Amino acid sequence: MKILVRVFGELTQIVGNRHNLELDEKASISTLAKEIARITGQKRKGYLGEFEVGGSEMAILVNGRNIDLLDGLATVLRDGDEVVLLIPTMGG
């Protein structure tokens, strides 16, 4: 199945800003994160750069819905889904 991944914020410097991935059926967000880490040369398990996948520093959306409102890292993806990875910025 094909998944479009869009990346925003500081994470773009680490993994790029867009990926079209081919994943096995029933792949999850966890599977997707591991594939992005593999193709971008990330070595630290469970992280993309310095940001923990599924941690509070990174928001992950599937078709506009935060995975925290779905099944978290176990959220199963479907063909054509759009996944957004972003690092929320703070400031004043």
Image: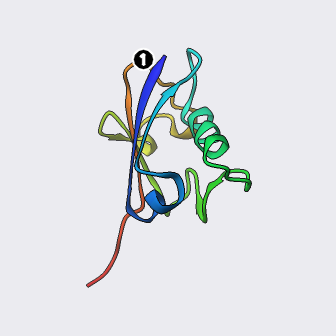
Q: Position of residue 17 (x, y in %)?
A: 40, 50
Q: Is residue 89 left or right of residue 43?
A: left
Is 54 located above or below residue 70 in the figure? below
Which residue lies under the disc numbered 1? Answer: 79
The quadrant holding residue 55 is bottom right
Q: Identify which residue is drawn at 42% across, 17% down.
A: 79
Front one among 54 and 82 = 82
The quadrant holding residue 50 is bottom right
Q: Residue furthest left?
A: 92
Name which residue type carries label 1.
Asp
Q: Identify which residue is drawn at 35% across, 70% down.
A: 89
Q: Position of residue 10 (x, y in %)?
A: 44, 65
Q: Position of residue 2 (x, y in %)?
A: 45, 21
Q: Which image quarter holds the C terminus?
A: bottom left
Q: Secondary structure at mark 1?
A: loop
Front one among 41 and 90 = 41
Q: Residue furthest bottom?
A: 92
Q: Would you call the spot at circle 1 few (<14 residues within 10 Å), some (14-19), or many (20 or more)?
A: some
